Image (cartoon, grey):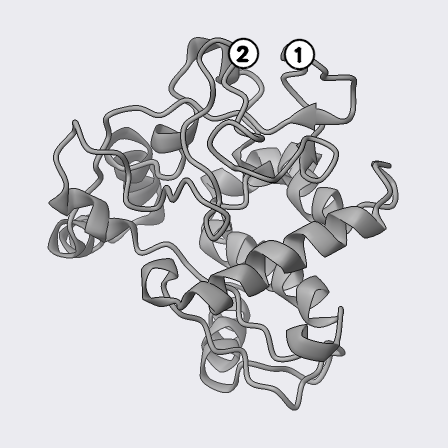
Amino acid sequence: MISFILLLSILLCIHGENDFDTYNPECPRIRKSWESLTRSEKDLYITGLLKIREQGEGQMKLDEFIAVGSEHEQAYGSVVHFGSTYLFWHGYLAWELESRIRNLGGEYACFGLPYWDFSTESLRSETDKPYIFENDIHGLGGNGNPDDFWTVNEFSWPGVETKDFWVPAHCQAEGDEYPVCSLKRSTSKATGPSAAGMGAGIIDNAQFADFSRWYSHTVNLPHNLLIDAEALKEPVVTSYDPIWY
């Protein structure tokens, strides 16, 4: 079974499609790092997310972004982090979100989900804000408001109200009314490993159990950059953060 999953993962990476891909399989899924994208390419991800959220009409059962993100809270989501399907499972969630944006059609038909090359964070000092944070209309927001339970919407993510992008958790901020509650972030000073450090961690921990323990204790991004405040650590809902993907 593990060999089959590994083979499937390799084929998906090589071909960018499979026989069951109904989300515009004729268009390759070209994925680039967030920092390498043009402003228009970044906007495609942001507007695609917001369109999906709009289609959900503020309802848990209709919102496809919530459908993908909530898998972390399901029974399998709680155990998969301890098995060797861990990375494949997370990759599949990214695939599903990417597919839903592609299915919007038009300019989104050939959309490729951007990724966060967090190894670049190792180059900054702990006093600098994370490179992934861009506090303008072309970014995904930054740290949350410490005076309003770490709310990101319209604090560091201008123009994006809670009704536009909401999460069904940590509903303590002003205006929050479950399930439509503001996105929350509290940033730690974590910088993460370099590309060489990450590679060494993989090589030195050939058994998945060892790798999992090493990763959770030394890297654990984006967790370490998004939920530093004690109030946000239970439940952990980073899968509702657009940076998580």
Query: Label 2 neighbourhood size at 10 Å, few (<14), some (14-19), many (20+)?
Result: few
Residue shown at 54% from the left, 75% from the top: 8
Looking at the image, which is closer to me, 205 or 142? Answer: 142
Q: In the rendering, at what x and y percent does residue 26 appear?
A: 65, 91
Q: Residue furthest bottom?
A: 26
Mark positioned earlier in the residue sequence (2 or 1): 2
Q: Is residue 39 above or below residue 125?
A: below
Amino acid beneath label 1: Glu
Residue drawn at x 53%, y 71% as measured from the top left: 112
- Dot 2 falls on a residue whose secondary structure is loop
Q: Secondary structure at mark 1?
A: loop
**Image vertical order of residue 64 relative to residue 111, above or below:** above
Q: Is residue 148 left or right of residue 60?
A: left
* Snapshot quadrant of residue 45: bottom right
Q: Alpha-carbon neighbours of circle 1 within 10 Å: few (<14), some, or many (≥20)?
A: few
Residue 239 in the image: x percent, y percent?
57, 39
Front-lying residue, 171 or 201: 171
Vertical arrangement, residue 83 with respect to residue 228, above or below:
below
Q: Residue at x 41, y 14 (%)?
A: 229
Between 92 and 229, which is closer to the camera in this rendering? Answer: 229
Q: How many marks?
A: 2
- Quarter occupied by residue 181: top right
Q: Quadrant of the N terminus?
A: bottom right
* Res. 148 mark: 2
Mark 2–mark 1 CB contact (< 8 Å): yes
**Mark 2–mark 1 distance (CA, rounded to whole Å):** 7 Å
Q: Position of residue 80 (x, y in %)?
A: 55, 42
Q: Which residue is mark 1?
A: 174
Residue at image location 38% in from the left, 59% down from the top: 34
Residue 93, position as x, y percentages in the image: 60, 55
Q: Amino acid at mark 2?
A: Asp
Q: Viewed as shown, does residue 45 lie left or right of 57?
A: left
